[in-house]
């Protein structure tokens, strides 16, 4: 699996043109983070369904530490604004990001969860 | 399924960069081999920084393409061009945008949302004028903005965005003029590129995104997280590469769309939930 090509096209295009219409890229398949981030597990190691994981988050109250304690480490995307998006995944049949069910959590700059959503996995495209 | 569209193998890209670096190093080494001598002083005209400029002719070609293609994709839509920041701290509110030819320069008004339109000017075409803002190279980026009027707030129309991709490439906002310009030829078949599924054309929302949903009739689909934030969720190395991407300071506003998935009609609504929306 290669994760580079699209982003490399971006880099190449920027180097050539100063504009990137194809920035950043994803690979074809969903691979777990090397350290296991993004896979939900309770402190006792029990599996947790997406809705149960969502219910474990209290919007306006849960901090990053609270969420880590409840669900384990996530794939995190911090932004310059101070907001941060965390993602947990339940892989689907074909291991693609599209097929995976996702729990997405938004933390405000104070580190408190303000939004969360579950996106059910989608069928593969032919 | 393959998502590789504008693919260029990593090793090949690195080799190209390395080649340029080696060429520069070789030139420097060669210079050091020569005996030192005093050279006469020279005066270099111009400024130390390069402006961001685009070809007027090419942008007009984009406008022509819009006129030809809009009946099929976005019959009610209006085309504007848009300037976006590429570097933190770029002043976007006092930009002077000009069309500059050999014998004239004309100022182009910019709206408060940083969009503008180009007037058709035979003289500018004849003189192969450039469209240039008074900003340093790589401090800003460009996109088309094609909007059907009357849509609800926080929504776009998929057909408009399909046309944005096509016109954006036709207008040569991705141009072919650099040291590794042939790479940009990958964009030359714009129709095919913009009909990929998913198409790797980066769109920018108005504000930082929490989710993007496609809606047509009763059918609704939330985009997977890998279609947001320039693919950051599955790309731990993205941050180090951001300086090379025109999404550098807009990552939280970026999204990809399944432009080539014709099961989503052009009238599909693209709905945005922003980070700062109230729950």
Image: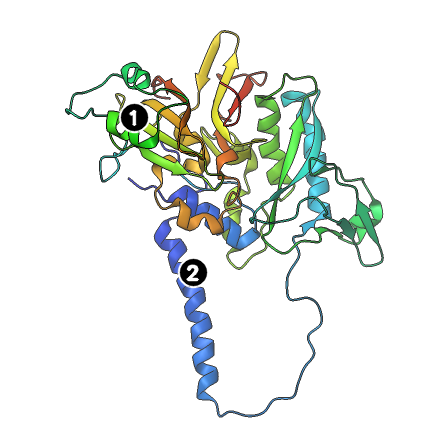
Coloration mode: rainbow
Judging depth in this view, the residue of B55 and B64 nearest the camera is: B55
Residue B250 appears at what percent x and percent y?
A: 53, 40
Residue A111 appears at what percent x and percent y?
A: 40, 33
Q: Residue at x 38, y 23 (%)?
A: A61
Chain containing mark 2: B
How crowded pointer 1 is (Cα within 10 Å; few <14, some 14-19, many 20+) is rated as many
**In the rendered image, residues at marks 1 and 2 fall on the same chain:** no
3D distance between C-alphas at marks 1 and 2? 36 Å
Residue B148 appears at what percent x and percent y?
A: 68, 21
CB atoms of marks 1 and 2 within 8 Å: no
Q: Residue at x 44, y 19 (%)?
A: B222
> Where is mark 2, residue-wise?
B17
Is residue B164 found left or right of A109 in the rendered image? right
Quadrant of residue B11 in the image?
Answer: bottom left
Judging depth in this view, the residue of B12 and B274 nearest the camera is: B274
> Where is mark 1, residue-wise?
A89
Q: Is residue A66 visible?
A: yes
- Please, is residue B242 above or below residue B152 in the view? below
Judging depth in this view, the residue of B113 and A31 nearest the camera is: B113
Q: Residue at x 48, y 51 (%)?
A: B243
Of circles 1 and 2, which is in front?
Answer: 1
Is residue B163 found left or right of A99 in the rendered image? right
Q: Label 1, secondary structure: give it.
A: strand
Q: Label 2, secondary structure: give it.
A: helix
Residue A27 appears at what percent x and percent y?
A: 34, 37
């Amino acid at each position: 699996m290669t994760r580079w090509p699209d982003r490399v096209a971006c880099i190449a295009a920027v180097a050539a043109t100063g504009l990137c219409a194809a920035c950043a890229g994803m690979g074809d398949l969903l691979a777990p983070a090397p350290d296991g981030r993004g896979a939900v597990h309770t402190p006792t190691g029990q599996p947790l369904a997406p809705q149960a994981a969502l219910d474990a988050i209290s919007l306006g109250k849960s901090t990053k530490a609270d969420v880590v304690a409840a669900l384990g480490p996530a794939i995190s995307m911090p932004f310059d604004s101070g907001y941060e998006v965390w993602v947990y995944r339940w892989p689907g049949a074909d291991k693609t990001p599209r097929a995976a069910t996702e729990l997405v959590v938004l933390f405000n700059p104070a580190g408190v969860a303000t939004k969360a959503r579950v996106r059910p996995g989608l069928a593969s495209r032919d | 399924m393959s998502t590789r569209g504008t693919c260029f193998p990593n090793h090949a890209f690195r080799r190209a960069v390395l080649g340029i670096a080696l060429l520069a190093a070789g030139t420097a080494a060669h210079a050091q081999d020569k005996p030192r001598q005093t050279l006469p002083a020279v005066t270099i005209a111009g400024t130390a920084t390069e402006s961001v400029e685009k070809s007027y002719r090419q942008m007009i070609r984009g406008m022509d393409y819009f006129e030809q293609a809009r009946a099929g994709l976005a019959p009610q839509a209006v085309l504007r061009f848009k300037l976006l920041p590429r570097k933190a701290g770029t002043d976007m509110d006092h930009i002077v945008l000009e069309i500059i030819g050999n014998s004239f320069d004309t100022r182009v008004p910019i709206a408060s949302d940083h969009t503008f339109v180009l007037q058709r000017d035979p003289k500018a075409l004849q003189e192969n004028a450039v469209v240039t803002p008074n900003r340093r190279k790589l401090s800003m980026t460009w996109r088309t903005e094609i909007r059907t009027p009357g849509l609800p707030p926080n929504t776009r129309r998929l057909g408009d965005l399909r046309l944005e991709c096509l016109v954006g490439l036709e207008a040569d906002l991705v141009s072919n003029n650099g040291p590794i310009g042939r790479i940009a030829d990958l964009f030359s078949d714009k129709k095919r590129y913009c009909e990929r599924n998913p198409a790797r054309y980066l769109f920018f929302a108005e504000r930082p995104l929490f989710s993007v949903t496609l809606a047509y009739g009763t059918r609704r689909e939330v985009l997977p997280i890998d279609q947001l934030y320039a693919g950051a969720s599955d790309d731990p190395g993205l941050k180090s590469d951001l300086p090379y991407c025109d999404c550098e300071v807009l990552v939280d506003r970026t999204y990809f769309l399944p432009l080539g998935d014709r099961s989503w009609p052009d009238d599909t609504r693209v709905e945005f939930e922003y980070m700062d929306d109230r729950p």
